[in-house]
Structures are given as C-alpha cells and as structure tokens.
C-alpha cells in the first residue's frame, strides 16, 4: 500500500490543492495528515474541509489545538493568527458545517500506531509540541536517545517544517543527501519529517510532502502560486504580512 504523508498545511489551500492533485495523478492508495491543518494561513476552513474529505486520519497539531482550545506559549503573531482562525470557524453561518468542523478538530489523534510505525505531529515524547531539530543530533544527543526509545521501527513527525530523515546514531539526512529517497533497512530505526505543505522552513518555498511504501519513503517538492497566498495574507488585517513574506523564501 502506498501512503502520502502531508503535514503543516497551515491554512494554505493553494499549496494543498497542488499537493492533492499530484497525489491523485500518482494513484496513491491513501493520505494521512500529521497535523497543523490550520493556523497562520488565510484559508483555514477550506484546508480543514479538504483534510476531512481526503485523509484517512489526521493528527492533532499545536495550531489545531490552539484554535480548538487556547494558543498557549505562542508568539504574538501566531496568537493573533489563531484567534483570527477561530473567528472564521465561529462565523460559519451553516450550523451543521460549524459543528462538523469543530467535532473533527476535537477528534484529531494524538498518537497513531500501525505495524511498528508511529505517527505524531511533533515527537514521540510530546506528540503535540516538542520540536525535533536537525541540530539536536549534535547539540542534544540525550534528547534524541530518549525520543528514539519511544518507538520501535519508524516514526513520522512534522512540526519543524524541515524535511529529512533522523537515524539513531543519531544523525540527520536532508533529502538532497539521499537523492530524494530513503530505503528502509531491515534493522532501521528512523524518524521521518515529510516537511510542510503550506509553510516550508528549509529555504525551499515549494510545497513538500512524502510518499511511503514497503520499500522506501520518497520526498516530493512542488511549485505553487506563492504570490497568491502572500496577497491573501496581506488582505487580512489580523494576519501579519510576515506570514506571507516568509513563504517566498521558505523560512
């Protein structure tokens, strides 16, 4: 079975539609989402509706949690975006749609196990809000050891918006070092980040997602109309212009 793994859409429907079209063209069996469907971006309702319709399951991200509950420990830009996003949900005139969206948010998964593979938004230790950065393999080896102790074979995470593979040496390999593909080894223990659909932070503005099957994981990057999203963000007074400008540079 082939699985498309998407993450960190952040209300960017322009990027999500391009990713979904590519997934459809490839004839992928199913789609799973690692969370942060909403937050930051200008089209939260459209993104949530698409995930509800297309994904087999989705994880609870910290921005999904913030809109549903409270944006704790957010900077002022992220907090303002969370409150604006919540208003979009609350201002939906169709009571059934409003209820369905809130119920879906409330039922997002925190951890999902499948035959030795763990899916979370952030990390196996703190699945909603712990960051696993590439630099951690050098600066925080004890943290990495503790994280790797929490699963058996593979773990898929999002949250940092940085694409790549962590191995238990520990080490980190960006897709460029792997030729865009990582083949599963018999005794592998790895953490895979598919990158961000809607807000990449690896200096590559293209939308990012991953394709997994029994043999490998492949990283996919796709061009989309970034400027259209920048313009949408500028048109919303409660969203900082920075949230659009950062998309141009992938940061």
Image: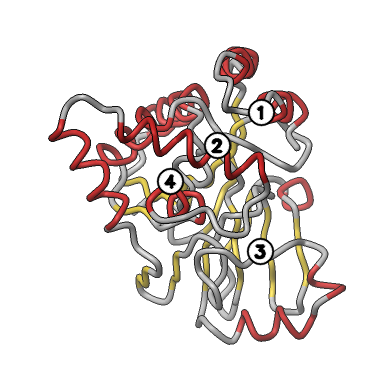
Q: Residues within 10 Å of mark 2 (few under 14, many from 20)?
A: many
Name the residue beneath numbered marker 3. 131
- Residue 85 in percent (x, y) is at 45, 35
Q: Residues within 10 Å of mark 3 (few under 14, many from 20)?
A: some
- Point out the frontmost of discs 4 and 3: 3
Tell me which residue sits at (44%, 65%) in the image.
119
Closer to the N terminus: mark 1 or mark 2?
2
Q: Which mark is residue 240?
A: 1
Looking at the image, residue 188 sits to the left or right of residue 201; the answer is left
Where disc 1 sits, the SS reads loop
Where disc 4 sits, the SS reads strand
* Labels 1 and 2 touching (C-beta < 8 A): yes
Tell me which residue sits at (76%, 46%) in the image.
176
- Residue 156 in percent (x, y) is at 52, 62
- Point out the frontmost of discs 1 and 3: 1
Name the residue beneath numbered marker 4. 4
Question: What is the image's colouring?
Answer: secondary structure
Looking at the image, residue 22 sits to the left or right of residue 227; the answer is left
Which quadrant would residue 98 be assigned to in this image? top left
- Point out the frontmost of discs 2 and 4: 2
Q: CA distance from mark 2 to mark 3?
A: 20 Å
Q: Nearer the viewer, residue 44 or 200?
A: 44
Tally of marks = 4
Name the residue beneath numbered marker 2. 81
């Amino acid at each position: 079975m082939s699985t498309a793994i998407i993450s960190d859409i952040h209300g960017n429907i322009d990027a999500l539609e391009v990713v979904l079209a590519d997934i459809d063209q490839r004839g992928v069996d199913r789609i799973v989402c690692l969370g942060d469907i909403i937050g930051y971006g200008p089209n939260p309702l459209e993104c949530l509706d698409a995930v509800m319709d297309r994904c087999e399951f989705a994880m609870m991200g910290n921005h999904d949690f913030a809109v549903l509950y409270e944006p704790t420990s957010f900077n002022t830009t992220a907090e303002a975006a969370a409150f604006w996003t919540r208003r979009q949900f609350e201002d939906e005139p169709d009571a059934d749609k409003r209820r369905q969206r809130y119920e879906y948010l409330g039922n997002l998964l925190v951890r999902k196990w499948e035959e030795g593979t763990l899916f979370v938004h952030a990390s196996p230790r703190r699945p909603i809000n712990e960051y696993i950065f590439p630099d951690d393999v050098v600066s925080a080896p004890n943290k990495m050891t503790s994280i790797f102790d929490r699963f058996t074979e593979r773990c898929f995470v999002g949250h940092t918006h940085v694409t790549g593979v962590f191995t238990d040496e520990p080490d980190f390999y960006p897709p460029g070092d792997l030729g865009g593909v990582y083949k599963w080894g018999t005794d592998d223990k790895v953490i895979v980040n598919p990158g961000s659909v809607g807000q990449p932070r690896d200096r590559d503005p293209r939308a990012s997602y991953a394709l997994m099957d029994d043999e490998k994981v492949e990283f996919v990057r796709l061009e989309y109309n970034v400027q259209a999203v920048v313009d949408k963000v500028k048109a919303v007074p409660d969203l900082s212009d920075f949230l659009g400008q950062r998309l141009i540079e992938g940061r």
